[in-house]
Amino acid sequence: MHIPDGFLATPVWAATDVIALPAVAYTARRAQRAFDEARVPLLGVLGAFVFAAQMINFPVGPGTTGHLVGGALLSFTLGPAAASVVMTAILSIQALVFQDGGVLALGANTINMALLGVLAGYLPFALWGGGRFRRLAIFAGGTLSVLVSALAALSELLVSGVKMPLPVLGLSLALFLVSAVLEGAITLAIMEALARIQPGAARAEREFARPGWPRALAMVSLAALVLASVGVLLASAAPDGLERLGEQIGINSKVRTLIHTPLSNYRAAFLHSDALGKAAAGLAGVALVYCACLVVGRMVARSRSL
Amino acid sequence: MRHVVLDRWSRGASAVHRRDPRAKIVPLLALLIAVATADRAVPLLAFELVFVLSAGLWWAGVPVLDALARAALVLPFAASFAAIAWLGGDPARGLSLALKSYVSALAVLFVVSTTPLPALLGGLGAMGAPRFLLEVAQFLYRYLFLLSEEAQRMAGAAAARNASLRSWRGSGERFRAAAGALAVLFARSYTRAADIHRAMLARGFEGRLPTLSSGRFNVADGVFAAISSVLPWALRLVAAGSRQGIS
């Protein structure tokens, strides 16, 4: 899942680096606020633990083993911001010291594993971690963290023009699914063992026990994360119903565009890559709708308070 | 362990080792961008860069063949995608993927094997990387060896108790045992972190790691950074020019 240098197209690595830099700075600041600065050793040592944990193999079948990836486990024990910082530190050390993942691709790898992966691992626990579905939430967190990271990496490679025939793509998806389920099982087994030997180790559990956690927001974020990752792979290039009807009765050729915008036809005109242009337009659209809802919501709230 | 070798290489005293980390980070980025954006004459460019980096490693007193072999760690991943591109009827792209990732890995290795990691992280900090993240990375690297050896001892102890992974029988118990071992390792790491924290507080730690290096960027660093940043782009022009000459 660690993408090396030389694989990603320039717009992809440049865009992911540009997105990752402020995102990492923001999570570092949040983690710094949540953790007293003098407790930095804890984060470093738990990062070293994830490295070390990857040396302990789990039996999966005859002669087959798997190992922990650790993003979800860190998010359950440290909270999402600190877990993202620790995962970013792990990815940086892996890229620099172990030649596992590239330096220019560090932005992409950070987004895939330290940001999307950690968030996807954390959200099921945020939704159901405190109740009777706790075990399911832990398993789903571990599974989703690997699945979302892997799908994001695969999407970036496909957008970059790395050729992958359909059988190879199918095989990759099957392997990712197996790895993801394995991560879920390993994370659940460790959390169960941890609950016996060190009760209360799950920091996130204590935080979610508090009332008022915006459950709907977490659920929407989780759905958006999964859709954003899988969307590039599953999106259909076929026209929608109205466009199809227009094609059939021949009125599409008479359509005139009155105003040209940078995001017309759901594609960012300033990006050459078709897939990247569509992805950028989608993200920009989500951001615009969010801002519009925020402004309208505040106006409504203000008019009610008057 | 394998990465201890890299730590030993980085403690040399050559002229390259003495350069400020920033004077190596900037040319590294220049080289990586030159390689990543190259779309013509990639094999020739890769050959030129491997030659120049090998010469640099020799100048720095780093074992060249060992470094070349170590950079090949990236090849299994790259080779699988290269093979897919090759089989898909695009051998040039397949070769380009493998060569680009190898040269990039060798360039990163050149910088890491001539700069101790704490100094490298300090250089990144001086260039604006979040200090909190860099301190976490520094602690992570410091305790990586210790915890890895502990994990290896635990795996060795399990193997000594005949925890074979070759059959399905008892795999459920072994799965739970491995999870228990990791939970114990987690709890020990947590306790160790608390001990380290207390020990550091006793020595006056207030959240910042002090450094003894001056961090001054001198003229020699500037000259080294300028020449090494321009060199990969010049080599890229030479490779593209010779390709045009051939065609």
Image (cartoon, coloured by chain):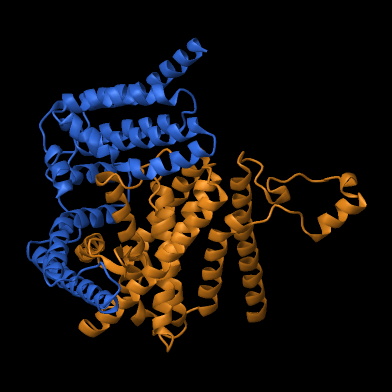
Chain colours: A orange, B blue
* Rendered view: B238 above or below B143: above
* Rendered view: B135 above or below B244: below
Of residue A138 and residue B165, the one placed in the foreground of this image is B165
Residue name at image x 40 percent, y 83 percent? A134
Question: Picture coordinates of residue A42 (x, y %)?
Answer: 21, 66
Residue B19 in view = no
Query: In the rendered image, which quarter is residue A210 located in?
Result: bottom left
Residue B139 in view = yes
Of residue A166 and residue A52, the one placed in the foreground of this image is A166
* Rendered view: A113 above or below A135: above
Question: Picture coordinates of residue B187 (x, y %)?
Answer: 19, 74
**Residue at the limit of the structure toward the bottom, as seen here:** A132
Instruction: Count every numbered label the image shows and give the total.
Output: 0
Residue name at image x 66 percent, y 42 percent? A269
Question: Picture coordinates of residue A219 (x, y %)?
Answer: 53, 75
Residue name at image x 45 percent, y 22 percent? B41
Query: In the rendered image, which quarter is residue A233 located in?
Result: bottom right
B87 with respect to B145 (left or right):
right
Question: Picture coordinates of residue A296 (x, y %)?
Answer: 66, 69
